[in-house]
């Protein structure tokens, strides 16, 4: 997606040789027009799938997921990173390792938010090693829901997330695929 690649090149910053910071349009301040286009693009790319629900993980996935939910006219559910008091133990739960924070946390979705009839499109802001997506897949499996696919805004293709998810037979669509980061430059794969 050209508009997105342009935003990453012009407005993103690089931390070390693996992290891309996009606080200027996605992870802190949010560019609503760009996010709207991201939602429309995922709708086009997954129009062959019978999607009934969007699932993401807080916090970075919520904004793009909401736009995808709007485009499909379906509800959006976000997994919470800590079990909250209002959930009363009636939750699906999976432990997820955070690539950026380097800690494990319990990720939960209330059981009444998912059903075996659901065809779920998973949306997240970044794909690195696939930990967050694998945790959400485990939760969807616990609920007996069908994984319709995974939509990623920014994939770092030099990390193992995509191959790990494709090994599970799941379709992965990423709107920007970063081939490598080095010497202050970001290079994209053609996607
Ligand atoms: P994974 O679970 O695939 O290893 O990492 C994806 C998750 O970690 C995403 O939900 C995202 O929040 C965070 N993440 C991974 N890499 C980056 C990155 O380069 N930049 C930012 N901002 N977040 C990242």
Image (cartoon, grey):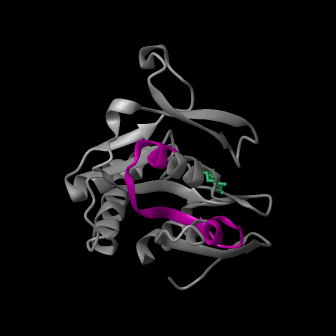
Please say if 26 is above or below 114. below
Residue sitting at x 60%, y 69%? 162
Out of 118 and 182, give the one closest to the viewer.
118
Please say if 41 is above or below 14. below
Residue sitting at x 68%, y 59%? 129
Out of 55 and 92, give the one closest to the viewer.
92
Residue 43's x, y, as percent? 28, 66
Out of 148 and 176, give the one closest to the viewer.
148
* Res. 29 in view: no
Q: Which residues are magenta?
A: 139-164
Residue sitting at x 25%, y 53%? 52
Residue 79's x, y, as percent? 47, 38
* Res. 175 in view: yes
**Quadrant in the picture for residue 133:** bottom right
Q: Residue furthest left?
A: 73
Asked if residue 100 is among those painted magenta in the image, a careful observer would answer no
- Is 38 left, or right, of 125 in this rendering? left
Residue 128's x, y, as percent? 66, 60
């Amino acid at each position: 997606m050209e508009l997105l690649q342009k935003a990453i090149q012009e407005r993103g910053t690089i931390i070390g040789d693996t992290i891309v910071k996009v606080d200027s349009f996605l992870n802190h301040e949010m560019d609503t027009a760009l996010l709207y286009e991201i939602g429309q693009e995922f709708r086009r790319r997954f129009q062959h799938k019978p999607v009934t629900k969007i699932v993401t993980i807080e916090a970075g996935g919520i904004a793009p997921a909401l736009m995808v939910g709007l485009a499909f006219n379906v509800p959006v559910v976000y997994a919470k990173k800590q079990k909250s008091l209002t959930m009363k133990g009636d939750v699906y739960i999976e432990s997820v390792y955070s690539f950026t924070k380097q800690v494990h946390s319990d990720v939960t979705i209330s059981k009444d938010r998912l059903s075996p009839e659901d065809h779920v499109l998973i949306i997240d802001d970044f794909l690195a090693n696939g930990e967050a997506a694998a945790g959400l897949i485990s939760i969807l499996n616990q609920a007996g829901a069908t994984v319709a696919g995974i939509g990623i805004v920014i994939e770092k293709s030099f990390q193992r997330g995509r191959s790990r998810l494709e090994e599970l037979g799941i379709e992965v669509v990423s709107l920007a695929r970063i081939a490598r980061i080095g010497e202050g430059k970001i290079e994209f794969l053609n996607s």
